[in-house]
Image (cartoon, grey):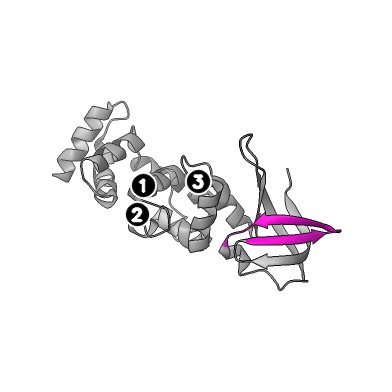
């Protein structure tokens, strides 16, 4: 794996740079959060990297100014239906610290304001990334304890959220109801029982 690239900044565009490393031009795709921190062309630069390479796609090398940016990118592309280019778009619209805060505080409204992020994807980002981002130690709610996280977990959470959204409830309503009912939902409850209890809380 290519961990970082160092050299002279040969090309600088908002979402693309080329680094001249001993006469070889290395192209990297970057989020705006990285681009705005880079020096002018002709200056020396070091970028942390992530190589995305699938059999059906051409290899793409992504560059990041900080380790936090790279870590958020890595967990974003691990979410279903979030490809590397969408991850870059999300990171270009919001700083890593602000994005982490949105996830930790379950701020679905602000997440859906990001390009390409609808209500269902926003809910999935919260579900799949909250614990991972808490472990990174960034964001205003990064001190959430594991015991608190466990109390807010319910069985089949992703499926339950999707079912309730299909019934017309907003992600915010669902999150609030889950917080209220999670402590009384049994760990071995069926998905039907979980939905029934949450619906009682919503009504």
Mark 2 and mark 3 residues within 8 Å of each other at the beta carbon: no
2 or 1: tag closer to the N-terminus: 2
2 or 3: tag closer to the N-terminus: 2
State the residue lying farthest toward the bottom. 40
Residue 66: image quadrant is bottom right
Q: What residue would you read off at disc 1?
A: 123
Q: Position of residue 107 (x, y in %)?
A: 36, 56
Relative placement, left or right, of 137 versus 57 is left
Dot 3 falls on a residue whose secondary structure is: helix
Indicate the quadrant containing the C terminus: top left, top right, bottom left or bottom right. top left
Q: Distance of mark 3 from mark 1, alpha carbons?
A: 15 Å
Residue at 29 percent across and 48 percent down: it is 175
Residue 120: image quadrant is top left
Q: Distance of mark 2 from mark 1, alpha carbons?
A: 7 Å
Residue stretch in magenta: 16-31
Is residue 18 within the magenta segment? yes
Relative placement, left or right, of 28 versus 161 is right
Q: Position of residue 169 (x, y in %)?
A: 22, 46
**Is the residue marked by circle 1 packed among few (<14), some (14-19), or many (20+) residues within 10 Å?**
many
Dot 2 falls on a residue whose secondary structure is: helix
Q: Position of residue 131 (x, y in %)?
A: 46, 45
Indicate the quadrant containing the N terminus: top left, top right, bottom left or bottom right. top right
Mark 2 and mark 1 residues within 8 Å of each other at the beta carbon: yes
Q: What residue would you read off at disc 2?
A: 108
Q: What residue would you read off at disc 3?
A: 132
**Is the residue marked by circle 2 packed among few (<14), some (14-19), or many (20+) residues within 10 Å?**
many
Residue at 57 percent across and 47 percent down: it is 74
């Amino acid at each position: 794996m290519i961990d970082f690239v160092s050299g002279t900044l040969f090309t600088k565009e908002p979402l693309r740079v080329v680094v001249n490393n001993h006469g070889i031009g290395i192209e990297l795709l970057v989020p705006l959060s990285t681009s705005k921190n880079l020096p002018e062309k002709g200056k020396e630069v070091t970028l942390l990297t992530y190589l995305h390479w699938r059999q059906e796609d051409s290899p793409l090398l992504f560059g990041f100014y900080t380790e936090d940016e790279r870590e958020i990118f890595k967990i974003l592309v691990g979410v279903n239906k979030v490809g590397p280019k969408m991850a870059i778009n999300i990171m270009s619209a919001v700083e890593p610290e602000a994005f982490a805060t949105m996830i930790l505080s379950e701020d679905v409204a602000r997440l859906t304001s990001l390009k390409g992020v609808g209500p269902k994807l926003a809910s999935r980002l919260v579900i799949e990334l909250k614990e991972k981002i808490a472990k990174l130690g960034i964001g205003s709610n990064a001190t959430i304890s594991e015991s608190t996280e466990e109390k807010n977990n319910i069985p089949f959470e992703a499926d339950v959220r999707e079912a309730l959204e299909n019934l017309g409830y907003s992600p915010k309503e669902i999150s609030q109801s889950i917080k209220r009912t999670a402590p009384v939902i049994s760990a071995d409850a069926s998905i039907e029982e979980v939905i029934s209890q949450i619906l009682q809380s919503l009504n």
